[in-house]
Amino acid sequence: MENIKNLPNIPDAPPIQQPNVFPVEWNIETVELEELFEKAKKEQWNAADINWNSLDPRDYDEIQKIAISYWFSVLATFERATPVFAKALIKAYETHAEQPVKFLFTSLVFDEGRHEECCMRCVNRLCPYWPWKWKPRNDFEEKVLKAINWIYYNGSRYWTAFVKAADVKYPLHILFTSFMMAETGATTIFKSMAERAKHPVFRDVFINIHRDEARHLAFTWYMLKKKLPYVNEEDKKYITKQLRAGFVFLSPILFEPISEFWKLPEGFLDIHRKMEEIARDAGLGVLSFEEKRLIWGNAVRTVKARIKQYGILFPDMPEIGIYGEESVEIKEEDIAFMGL
């Protein structure tokens, strides 16, 4: 062995100002989260392996193709969550969350990109270049294109608010409440759509996305169960608001757009409803208004029961027949905190 006695003395390194991703540490506190990350690795799937060639555009008329493409374009608004979870990943590292939390966020970043890829592939099979390069061929297409552009405009409002709020210091477990509400809705709706979809491609897409979202939901609950028993009264009030925010933001895909956040022109909802109806009749598996209200409502009641045991007031959600203990008003900045 080489002589190590003559190694020079060096001073201690300066302290690292926080928040920062350094120093490196691999702390593990929650075995269940470590196991969930292992599950995430085992459940990985390749969107390219779905038999996209079997989704033949000749099987649908022009109106059906536009309606299905419209629906996937709306879904893509929410599946474009990759940069949001990338920010959450950075926050987890900067706040030195336990290592399984950081690793799970890496899987979420990849999952959301894969979900958006499915939206892209479905649209490109039926209406290539919809909507960003699409040239309307008639009055119908022009109206539908305007509708999706209104959805994207509101998505841009969320992103602008998100960027402005990026440095707000809220603990991950508080911000996870809106994420949990979103995942609760996603797991429920995608499972139901997979059961109703007529085409194998649509079924495969929804089954695979449902599996990912169910894992994401488990992630949120592990985080919340660990932290909620110790939150103070001020944080409890913010959690109540975040529960409502998660529901409002996801409303265009899980229910119908709620005006607390979604600024949409008169007539938009008529177009949106008609596109969902046409896509549903074409076999996409889109739920009816009453089905969404029932299925989403049952899922939210389960959340309400679980949240209540921690002494947290549940917000009113009259749109789906849920009346909690508190009426809250959601502002743009509340939506912005989703994913931070």
Image (spheres, rainbow, N blue to C red):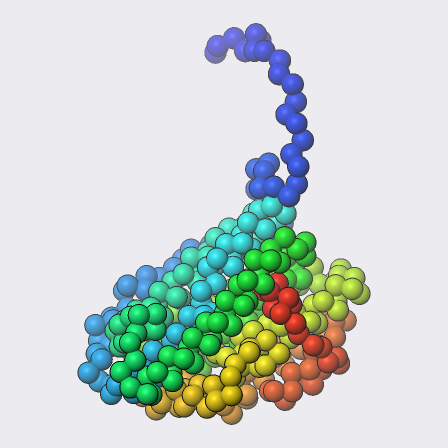
Q: Residue furthest right?
A: 233
Tell me where residue 226 appears, x and y as whole percent.
Answer: 67, 59
326 and 225: which one is in front?
326
313 and 311: which one is in front?
313
Q: How many marks?
A: 0
In this rendering, position of residue 134 left or right of residue 295 = left
162 and 234: which one is in front?
162
What's the residue at 43%, 81% (across, down)? 147
- Residue 230 lies, with reference to residue 148, above or below; the image says above
Tell me where residue 331 appears, x and y as whole percent.
Answer: 65, 72
Tell me where residue 313 appears, x and y as whole percent.
Answer: 74, 75
Would you say residue 169 is visible in this rendering? yes
296 and 56: which one is in front?
56
Would you say residue 309 is visible in this rendering? no
What's the residue at 35%, 62% (across, down)? 45
- Residue 276 lies, with reference to residue 170, above or below; the image says below
| Quadrant, the C terminus | bottom right
- Residue 166 lies, with reference to residue 249, above or below; the image says above
What's the residue at 50%, 67% (across, down)? 156
Which quarter of the picture shows residue 72?
bottom left
What's the residue at 60%, 87% (across, down)? 320
Which quarter of the picture shows residue 70?
bottom left
Tell me where residue 97 appears, x and y as whole percent.
Answer: 61, 49
In this rendering, position of residue 71 left or right of residue 232 = left
